[in-house]
Amino acid sequence: MQLTRNLWKSYTETIHAFSATELSRPGLSAATVTFLKGCGLPADCEPCLAFEKFVDNKYISTVNEVLGTSDKELDNYLMIGTNGSGAPVCIDLARKNEIVYLDHDQHFERVFINASIVHFAQCLVGYQDFLAAENGGRKFTDTEMQQLKSLLRKADRRALDNGSFWNAELEYLEWERGNA
């Protein structure tokens, strides 16, 4: 996969890229900075994710800065978007820039998404391609689901761990297919 701004072009028109100044927060890895400057993030994409440039005082913002809270723990999370329930999607500065969401219905419980922003992009692209194959309402086959799971595991070996974002998303897709 070529990591350029064109990465998202077939999925969306609006891409949020960050400047070097916006990314000059302590704790951001060089790989994270390079990706967010060069590729950015799509304004929105499946599975029900929306990305924004949450920038306050010239820098990418922490969850506390965006939500106006003062929980010291939330200063470790830089907010890059939200999921379908409005929970913050973040870069976890305390855990090597892992991508997580904070379940606001569970007192901001941390839910693992991917080990890095690059792993996250690889999983998002694979997921978008999987959904594109279903276009027109065709249900996916068991083989196609296994191929998606394999792709996600190849991109990030922890992507399908119990309790992870991707594991829950695929369980939902399988449930939806069986109950549609």
Image: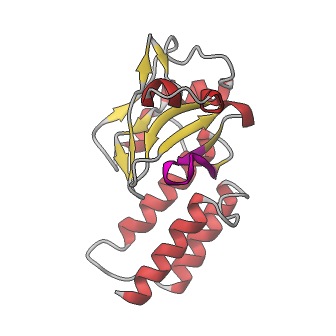
Image coords of residue 130 (percent x, y):
45, 67
Task: Tell me, yes or no, if residue 118 can be seen here.
Answer: yes
Measured along the vertical axis of the image, is residue 115 above or below residue 73? below
- Which residue corresponds to the image point at 41% horizontal and 80% vertical from the top-left? 176
Task: Tell me, yes or no, if residue 140 can be seen here.
Answer: no
- Which residue corresponds to the image point at 61% horizontal and 26% vertical from the top-left? 75
Measured along the vertical axis of the image, is residue 157 above or below residue 25? below
Image coords of residue 76 (percent x, y):
64, 29
**Camera-side residue: 110 or 178?**
110
Measured along the vertical axis of the image, is residue 120 above or below residue 79? below
Q: Is residue 46 left or right of residue 101?
A: left
Image coords of residue 80 (percent x, y):
47, 35
**Which corner quadrant holds the C terminus?**
bottom left
Most common secondary structure along the magenta stretch: strand
Image coords of residue 11 (percent x, y):
34, 50
State how the image is colored: secondary structure
Residue 86 lies in the magenta-colored region: no
Q: Which residues are magenta?
A: 100-113
Q: Examine the image and state in which quarter residue 152 appears.
A: bottom right
